[in-house]
Amino acid sequence: MKNCEENMKKISIMIPCYNEVENVDLMAMAVENVLNEALPQYDYEILFIDNCSTDGTREKLEALCAKNKKVKAIFNVTNFGQFNSPFYGMCQTTGDCTITMCCDFQDPVELIPVFVQEWEKGHRIVSGIKTSSKENGFVYFLRSVYYKLIRNMSSTEMIEHFTGFGLYDKTFIDILRKLDDPIPFIRGIVAEYGHGFNRKDIAYNQPKRKAGKTHNNIFTLYDAAMLSITSYTKVGLRLATLLGFLSSGISLLIALAYLVLKLLYWNSFPAGNIPMLLGVYVLGSLQLFFIGLIGEYILNINTRIIHRPLVVEEKRLNFDDEKEKKSTEA
């Protein structure tokens, strides 16, 4: 049996999780059922990477790993955010291809065989693209506006409504391991290199979360937006520079006009006039906005210079030997 498995292609399913105690058992069962029923000719591993859950998720994962040696788990020492942990998990997989999906069932497990079928046709990246979603309609609208904005701003053709859900050949995973990026943005990386890997897009309708509460909020959405803008666009800095020059020119004109009017109407011209105040407030607010935007770029640069590790592990389960660990870190 062991020799037979060694000759089989291996599919890795990588599932990041954080406080998903209600979903991990169901997700593991659903993935196993799809793999055993639709793809019995493949070997597999299911890797959960837990971002320091506090709700009992880890106890559930330990029980899953004890029952099935093909279920693996990595426990992070703290929460490393919505980008680092999944990226790191992808780099720890050992399969011929890796499929990434969320633990809340918003990424349909039924698409796993579809992805694999396209992979066998020669597509080394297969991306799941949301064509509609049962999430809050206003949030979905804001996402659509954001994707179109970032697509127009970036020199890289960004993929609209792509969350990272998809299949990646091991040759692409090898590239991820070599990137050495402390703040990786997988959506941008796929958009940047995907054409060279014969990327195939698969449309799907995103269902509602099966259980629990979403961990996305205004801060996580803002973080995602700023990471994509500061990593894949120059427009913000160029716009700040151009409007900075424009603001300086307007300020100089206002100052000269004020001086001329004051000299011509020395006694009647008021000391504090409305146009002057409006000019100061409008131009000042523009300057503050772009100082903040430039600060985001500097924060991005600072994080890359400090170059902390993507993730620090607390422990890993069902990684049988150090040889396997080293092969995933190479």
Image (tube, helix red, strand yellow):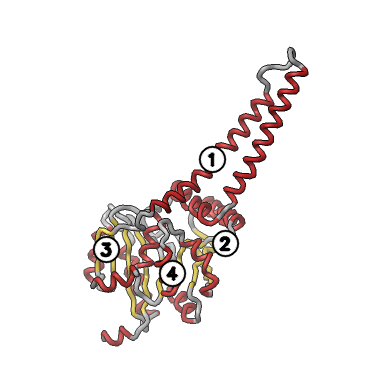
Estimate how packed mark 1 is, as few (under 14), some (14 to 19) or many (20 or more) residues with alpha carbons within 10 Å: few
Quadrant (top left/top right/bottom left/bottom right) for the N terminus: bottom left
Estimate how packed mark 3 is, as few (under 14), some (14 to 19) or many (20 or more) residues with alpha carbons within 10 Å: many
Q: Secondary structure at mark 2?
A: loop
For the residues labelled 3 and 2, the Cα–Cα distance comes to 38 Å
Instruction: Name the amino acid, label 1.
Output: Ile
First of labels 1, 2 by sequence position: 2
Identify the residue shown where x is 43% and y is 74%: 171
Quadrant (top left/top right/bottom left/bottom right) for the C terminus: bottom left
Res 96 → quadrant: bottom left
For the residues labelled 1 and 2, the Cα–Cα distance comes to 25 Å
Of labels 1 and 3, the one closer to you: 1
Query: Are discs 1 and 2 less than 8 Å apart at CB?
Result: no
Identify the residue shown where x is 49% and y is 67%: 128
Instruction: Say above or below: 141 vs 330.
Output: above
Q: Secondary structure at mark 3?
A: helix
Question: Which residue in the structure is indicated by mark 4?
Answer: 175
Res 6 → quadrant: bottom left
Q: Position of residue 195 (x, y in %)?
A: 55, 71
Query: Are discs 3 and 4 less than 8 Å apart at CB?
Result: no
Question: Which residue in the structure is indicated by mark 3?
Answer: 61
For the residues labelled 1 and 3, the Cα–Cα distance comes to 45 Å
Instruction: Say above or below: 25 vs 295.
Output: below
Question: Which residue in the structure is indicated by mark 1?
Answer: 291
Of labels 4 and 2, the one closer to you: 4
First of labels 4, 2 by sequence position: 2
First of labels 4, 1 by sequence position: 4
For the residues labelled 3 and 4, the Cα–Cα distance comes to 29 Å
* Residue 156, label in figure: 2
Foreground of the two, 86 or 140: 86
Instruction: Name the amino acid, label 2.
Output: Thr
